[in-house]
Amino acid sequence: MGLIYPDKCVLCGETLPLDAGKAMVCAACAGEVRQKYRCAETVRIDDADGAAAPLYYTGKVSGAMQRLKFHHKQHYADWFAAQTLPLLTERLDRWQPDLITYMPIGPLRWYQRGYNQAELIARKIAEPLGLPCRAALDKRLFSRRQSRQQGLAARQKNVEHAFLPAKGVDLGGLSVVLVDDIITTGSSAASAVKILRQMGAARVYVLASTLARQKR
């Protein structure tokens, strides 16, 4: 196979057949995605003008996202972007995006990982639509990891002051799409939306590759 697409299924790790072409998942996992992992619910983020996610963050999908984030499987971003792009395409007339941006990660996380998975996905989404993609937000240096916060209240408090406007970015009057990898409670996205609005964005939409099901 070529350098862009792996020869193993993104979701289960099984070797793909030689005639798989550009497919990144095997036939069995493709069927599971349609039957088990498609997000069928309305996504809501406080203060956002709209939000959407194509997949539930569970099972094989969550495993693949973890490998993208923590095990240097950067090419997995191609698959997650391919799942997410159609949601934006079908909303172009309503959202009319001027800019694609993405959730930032902290300097320490960048140093450890060497990349921002949300940025990788965002750039793959923006490119085929001819939309600009750039950082609009920075994350404060000593922000605590959101994944370690238990419960909605703790997550909301943790991200109250987690984000800063990126220097030299003017969002005045723009329609901005914020790309994220996972929406859990939506607290991080809501905090980021608030800052983007303070930077002058006329409309802010959130587009995440996965949505965590809330415990009931």
Image (spheres, rainbow, N blue to C red):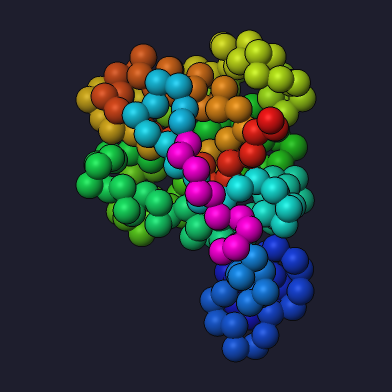
Quadrant (top left, top right, bottom left, bottom right) of the N terminus: bottom right
Q: Identify the residue at horizontal 65%, vertical 33% (top origin).
A: 214
Q: Answer yes or no: is residue 135 visible.
A: no
In which image quadrant can residue 134 be found? top left
Indicate yes or no whether the magenta region holds residue 37: yes
Task: Indicate the position of residue 80 as horizontal and vertical percent values.
Answer: 56, 55
Q: Residue furthest bottom?
A: 19
In this rendering, the answer to whether 38 lies above or below 202 is below
Q: Identify the residue at horizontal 36%, vertical 14% (top origin).
A: 198
In this rendering, the answer to whether 69 lies above or below 104 is below
Q: Answer yes or no: is residue 113 visible.
A: yes
Instruction: Tell which of 112 and 21 is nearer to you.
Output: 21
Task: Indicate the position of residue 30 as horizontal and vertical percent values.
Answer: 61, 70
Indicate yes or no whether the magenta region holds residue 109: no
Q: Residue furthest front?
A: 216
Quadrant (top left, top right, bottom left, bottom right) of the C terminus: top right
| Left or right of residue 45: residue 7 | right
Q: Identify the residue at horizontal 42%, vertical 36% (top origin).
A: 51
Q: Identify the residue at horizontal 40%, vertical 21% (top origin).
A: 47
Task: Indicate the position of residue 37 as horizontal and vertical percent values.
Answer: 61, 55
In which image quadrant can residue 118 be found? top right
| Left or right of residue 91: residue 124 | right
Instruction: Please report the bounds of the magenta region as a residue range.
Output: 34-43
In this rendering, the answer to whether 154 lies above or below 118 is above
In this rendering, the answer to whether 120 lies above or below 177 is below
